[in-house]
Image: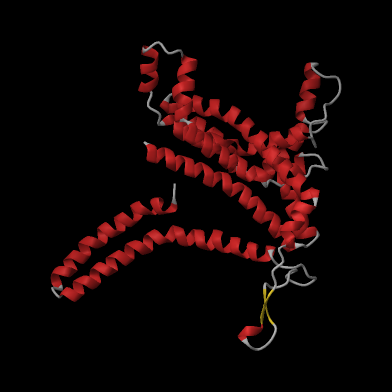
Amino acid sequence: MQPGLAAAPLAERLAGGSRRLLDAIGKLAPCRCTQILLIRWRISARTAVIAVPYLWLLLFFVVPFVIVLKISFSETQIAMPPYQPLLEWAGAQLADIRLNVNPGNFLYLFEDSLYLRAFVNSLQVAAVSTVAALLIGYPLAYAIARSAPRWRGILLMLVILPFWTSFLLRVYAWIGLLKNNGLLNNFLIWLGVIDQPIVMLQTDFATYLGIVYCYLPFMVMPLYANLEKMDLTLLEAAEDLGCRPLRAFASITLPLSLPGIVAGCMLVFIPAVGEYVIPALLGPSDSLMIGKVLWTEFFNNRDWPVASAVAIVLLLLLVAPIMYFQRLQGRESAAR
């Protein structure tokens, strides 16, 4: 939902309440100029309410993005902050302003294969984790949406229950489960399935497992919201026409749930690309993901310009598919 649409009901309520007050004042002020001023005040009040979410995006998204973009074109220096200012005063006059633009930070990302491998590995891990979360989350969301109404609240609470604890604590819990003398290995040995512990911790499998576990609710919730409001009479009509359940699912349920699939995949894929904690605690020590590269450049190498360039490229990689899907949805809505 767009911020302007979210603020529209609030603006309408405020405008509706103020409209009656202004009408009463207008009756007491028959002057034409006074009525024009009141109308203008009414419009400006409505505009101010609608502008709140856009102001929020400006302060907490656009401004930080501009700051990071500015740093990405700077040069590294041993100082605090560890980069040269983009504009420098070389003299006392306005014409003495010197612009220090260094596009070499972005060129350096493509010259060093380390950054390319980090981007590819991050996209691969995020894509596999997103597909796994979709394969697990879709049946779960479908089961919750088709369950009895008295059970839906309980099942949804169980889905979001892990969010009541710390994210770091949930990741650490998997260390106790997956380590060589952990609960899972001891349970398998007790069952006689294995004779010696299986190495599960510090592997790619542990990374995928941790990401899917931590971000699965982000896949389930939009899918449930989409499946729960679907018209079941469409499936009944397909059944009356002799359509088999599997074909009805592929022809009706799956296409109608596509917006929920896209939303869930974005909510899982975007944070998984830049994930740092889960690969650092559960993954192998030699795993190379973009979150680890950002941490190293910012805090170990203190190369803020290169780290900012990495962040800008990562942001563009994530924003581009989002804009593409929104454009497709806009075309579909216009076609309907």
Q: Is residue 331 left or right of residue 76?
A: left
Question: What percent of the width, then of the height, locates residue 305?
Answer: 72, 63
Q: Indicate how the structure is coloured in the image.
A: secondary structure
Residue at image coords 72%, 42%: 120
Write down the quadrant of residue 311 in the picture. bottom right
The furthest residue to the bottom: 92
The furthest residue to the right: 196
Q: Is residue 152 left or right of residue 89?
A: left
Residue at image coords 77%, 67%: 76
- Screen quadrant of the C terminus: top left
Q: Is residue 318 left or right of residue 295?
A: left
Question: What percent of the width, then of the height, locates residue 51?
Answer: 41, 61
Q: Is residue 60 above or below residue 171?
A: below
Q: Nearer the viewer, residue 311 or 108?
A: 108
Write down the quadrant of residue 163 in the picture. top right
Q: Is residue 221 above or below residue 144?
A: below
Q: Nearer the viewer, residue 311 or 334?
A: 334
Write down the quadrant of residue 75 in the picture. bottom right
Question: What percent of the width, then of the height, locates residue 89?
Answer: 67, 82
Q: Is residue 301 above or below residue 252?
A: below
Question: What percent of the width, then of the height, locates residue 219?
Answer: 56, 36
Q: How many marks?
A: 0
Residue at image coords 37%, 64%: 48
Q: Nearer the viewer, residue 87 or 33?
A: 87
Q: Is residue 12 above or below residue 206?
A: below
